[in-house]
Amino acid sequence: MITYTETRRHALDKLRMMMIDGHLAANQRSVDAGCSVRVHEGGYWGFAASPTAEVAELQAQARRNAGAMARFGARAKPPLPGGVYRGEHQFDGKPQLSAKECSDRLAELHAHCKRLYPGLRATRFLLHQEQHTKHVSTSHGADAHIGIQRAGFAMWLLALDERGLPIEVCEPLSGRGGVADLDLSVQTLAPRIDELHTHLQAKRHAVPARGGLHTVVLAPALAGMLAHEAMGHPCEADLVLGGAVTAYLVGQRVASELITMVDFAHHALGQETLIPVYADDEGTPARDAVLIERGLLKDFMSSRETAQALGLQPTGSARAYSPHDEPLVRMRNTAILPGTSQLGDMIAGVEDGYLLMTTTNGQADSTTEFMFGVSLGYEIRGGRVGRAIRDTTLSGNAIQALQTVDAVSDDMHWSCSGYCGKKQPMVVSVGGPSLRARAHLGGE
């Protein structure tokens, strides 16, 4: 007997274009569509997906898959918790640009850079956009039409440092909608390109960081990475059930009282988020998950099943990336909330430390141990920003690092340019202010 069934019709449209030193190196467009069915029967899940099969055929296959699992013995479970969502949300953006229009914009930016900065070794520009359109219906009565559209742009400037070694700096931009909804005109981007070039020149004469424990001012890109990778994943309920250290810390202090961290569903600080999730891929109404409140661990992100196991109400965090993926507990819009400090004052309060501005990658585990690549940073000496430092790493234990936070800036920056990896990619956004904390830097 089927206790629950869920049908998802899902289309995924993606565009990716890259220009390297004025030459178009990639121009890719893909469309993936299909239908999937999950059933919950005898205490087990069954899942089936296909680009062409009918719903009845997929439901039969999903039942067979659940039945195969039931050979381990039927499991009596109460009905899955959570309400149902009925509604539709789509982003009404500008008409899409043609491939030629996208290429022309990148070529204009390349020509601008080469004209103003003849010492550049090369330029690299990346455009990408994707649109998820889903219809989720369930035997509980959900009827959710879900639309998520996001676009991103990144520019790299490359040169040689004083040792003759290649160096680069990068500036990403992102937003809701498609590429047409980003302002990529030379007039708008010229000040940002000039600032990026200034960083590149400073990096040509960069010095190595001194390895060890230091006071660091983390720009929003690093603070967002810390929130997402080092604390966000350990607060996903499936990882909590799998043994994440956070399982034993609810109600305990895991950060400075200056830290409040939230995984927002669809609105944050009075505005719609970059990745608005009104209902997840189980048809559950999405709600905010306050993960850390004034330093205390409070809540987890959950699906129906993981919420049931933990005795919680679902947060509507079960999401699937492609039409053929099964929903997993995933972050949506994860951010540390702004504080009351001015960034200039935060730097002025550091006698000997570092300002860390951009990151290339990051990884963390369920113990909250983390390591991030730092691609742009500066020394702080006597409360002033000094020399640029070479690429290095930032590492430590997120709980210990967040407990040392003594200043949080009053501004807020959001980005949705990257992907989150957890068995399958996922579109997410991260946000936050600047933080001042203690953490370990790698050295030569």
Image (cartoon, helix red, strand yellow):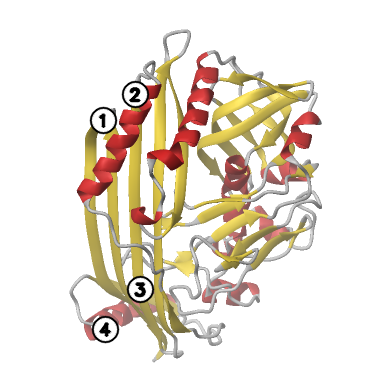
| Front: mark 2 or 3 | 2
Residue on which disc 1 sits: 22
Q: Secondary structure at mark 3?
A: strand
Q: Which mark identifies residue 60?
A: 4
Mark 2: few, some, or many residues within 10 Å (few <14, many ≥20)? some
Instruction: Identify the amino acid type marked 1.
Output: Gly
Q: Position of residue 394 (x, y in %)?
A: 61, 32
Q: Secondary structure at mark 4?
A: helix
Instruction: Identify the amino acid type marked 4.
Output: Ala
The reply to whether residue 419 is in sight is: no
| Front: mark 2 or 1 | 2
CB under 8 Å between callouts 4 and 2? no
Q: Position of residue 137 (x, y in %)?
A: 38, 84
The residue nearer to you, when weighing 385 against 251, is: 385
Instruction: Identify the amino acid type marked 3.
Output: Lys
Mark 4: few, some, or many residues within 10 Å (few <14, many ≥20)? some
Mark 1: few, some, or many residues within 10 Å (few <14, many ≥20)? some
Against 101, residue 438 (above or below) is above
Sequence-first tag of 1 and 4: 1
CB under 8 Å between callouts 3 and 1? no
Q: Which mark identifies residue 114?
A: 2
The alpha-carbon separation of the residues under discs 4 and 2 comes to 60 Å
CB under 8 Å between callouts 2 and 3? no
Left or right: 304 in relation to 64: right
